[in-house]
Amino acid sequence: MSNHTRRIFPVIAFLAAAFLYAPLRSTAQTSSTQSSTSAHGDRWLHVRVISTNSKGETVRVNVPLELAEKVLPAIDHDRLHNGKVRVGCMDCDGVDVRTIFEAVRSSKDGEFVTVQSNDEDVSVMKKEGMLYVHVHDKNKPKHSQVEVKVPMKVVEALLSGSKDELDIAAGLHALAGQGDVELVSVKDDENTIRVWMDSKNVTTD
Amino acid sequence: MVLLGKIALGFGATVLLAGAYTFREGLIRVDVDETHGRGEHVHVWAPAALVPMAMHFIPRNQMLRAGEQSAKFMPIVHVVAKELQKYPEAELVEVQDGPQYVHIRTHAGKLMIDAEEPGQTVHVSCPLSTIDDVSRELASLAPAS
């Protein structure tokens, strides 16, 4: 081996070693940030469905809100265009949903709807910037409970588009600005469904 | 003798650097194992670094056709792949339905899909950067709407 070759050999060896080391270092970095709380304050939307039937179905979905916000506008399918979904029933049977929401938004906290019957109890209330819908179905063997909790800002953002459409992208954006919140909870004799948002990138249950 | 040594060193360094580059970019891995029926086993391990390069050798008309056929969903794939690179370690979807199981996650910057059902298991692993590159290339070939 000549002197010249001897001189450049360590340089080549170093470059090769540095190149090889690059993925190991990035792996080490990523594994160190693998904790359940996301590193840079990302907001995650979680969906969990657990069935206690014979098949024992389980569904766990974790979606970064930022990803959903970016992907939605790219979808152009059926009723979904540019992050907005067209709904044909924003003026259902002469009931203007927007006007009702506007009335709820500008009114003080309180229970707006209470229906109690032998079959089910339904209540809709507004409290501390949240809209709550509670349905208690008494017909099933184990009474089913549906609880929906939506920040008013999110509802406002959803209805911020033009008439007959829901601005899902704006709703997600508004949701990202909220703290940890359980949005939907459904419990009946067979299924438990939860939809919630937090800063953790894994489902802890 | 010195000349041969230089050639050997140059060849060795090239192989080493090419190997290092290949490992740095990662591998695309597809494993399909059937225990029922014909009992096929398919195992494909390909360096991800080769895919963007190989795309340049595909005939232009074939690429245009692929771009046309994937025009509807490739921009979505591109956005998903690009965004998922921000989440190199994430559990995305896990579905257990009796004996059927699907698990989609990212690990070390790769998209990993595991699917199992009686008699068949499928494991796919692909670097997100490769999906990003390929989807961007195909999306750029889609006819303007």
Image: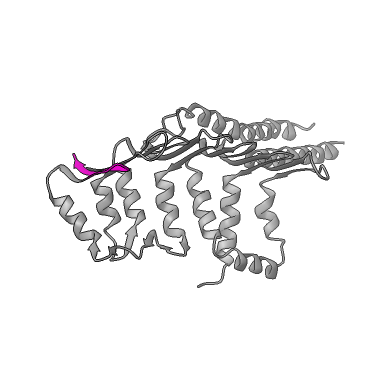
Q: Nearer the viewer, residue A44 or A132?
A: A132
The residue positioned farthest toward the left in the image shown:
A108
Q: In this view of the protein, which residue sits in the foreground, A184 or B90?
A: A184
Q: Residue at x 60, y 68 (%)?
A: B68
Q: Position of residue B5 (x, y in %)?
A: 82, 36
B47 on left or right of A114 = right
Q: Which of these two is toward me, B110 or B34? A: B34
| Residue furthest to the right | B1
Question: What is the quadrant of residue B141 in the picture?
Answer: bottom right
Residue lying at the far front of the rendered structure: A118
Q: Which residues are magenta?
A: A115-129
Q: Which residue is at 46% across, 32% downward?
A: A203
Residue B107, compared with residue B53, is above or below; it is above
Answer yes or no: is residue A149 visible.
no
Q: Is residue B35 magenta?
A: no
- Image position of B5 (left or right of A59): right
Residue A45 x, y percent position in the rendering: 40, 41
Residue placed at 58% from the left, 34% from the top? A54
